[in-house]
Amino acid sequence: MLVGFIAVIVILLVIVGFMSSDGTGSKDGGARFITEAKKIAAMMSHMENESQFYYARVESYAGIGMDYFEDVEFQKDLMVHTDPDGPMLKEDWENWPDETVFPSPYTGPYIELRGPAAGEMRIIVAPLNNGQNMGIFIIKRIFDNPEDSAIDPAFPKVLEKVLSFDPDYIGG
């Protein structure tokens, strides 16, 4: 009887193990992208903190942009100084800022998001509202054929949920 009880417990543990591993590898994303999204949220928090130093000196966000973050060597390992594939064009990227805020084509520095979920995402920064605010834009490459995309469609949804905990974050 004791052996039968132990066998039932082991079978239940195996079933629970299979269910949990299936949940993290399923098509809807879930837990497998949360760590990557949290790293991006932490980086954006550091960008906000760095921008406060800029604001303290200039008393405005006017003129803040990727050149400033490049000069202070922010995320040096992820900063791309010039696009190796040529200029970034608005029509190739989702969530591109308004052209009055950010030019198209863009040839300046950007932060490249890396990882299995964020392989074709970039961060660019620009001043907003005549220097009253700073905008952090996460742009995502647009592919003609969705099967060519390096970004799992579930990742932007997970990232949006993680970033929504920041009171300064305005989705898009």
Image (spheres, grey):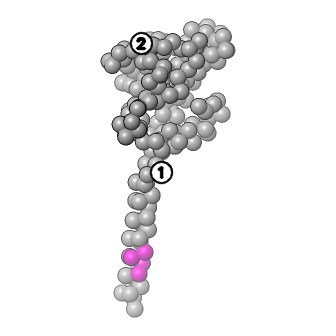
Q: In percent of the image, x 39 and y 36: which residue is there? A: 145
Residue nearest the observer in this picture, 2 or 67: 67
Q: Is residue 138 magenta?
A: no
Examine the rendering and report whether any part of residue 99 can be seen. Answer: yes
Distance between the alpha carbons at the discs numbered 1 and 2:
35 Å
Q: Which mark is residue 161?
A: none
Q: Position of residue 70 (x, y in %)?
A: 43, 14
- Left or right of 125? Residue 70 is left
* Mark closer to the chain start, 1 or 2: 1
**Residue at which label 1 appears:** 28
At label 2, counting other C-alpha atoms closer than 10 Å, the crowd grade (few under 14, some 14-19, many 20 or more) is some
Q: Amino acid at mark 1?
A: Asp
- Left or right of 129? Residue 105 is left
Quadrant of the drawing holding the N terminus: bottom left
In magenta, the rendered stretch is 8-12
**Residue at which label 2 appears:** 107
Q: In percent of the image, x 35 and y 37: which residue is there? A: 148
- Say what secondary structure mark 1 lies in: loop
Q: In percent of the image, x 66 and y 10: which residue is there? A: 130
**Contact (CB < 8 A) between labels 1 and 2?**
no
Q: Amino acid at mark 2?
A: Thr
Q: Position of residue 75 (x, y in %)?
A: 42, 23
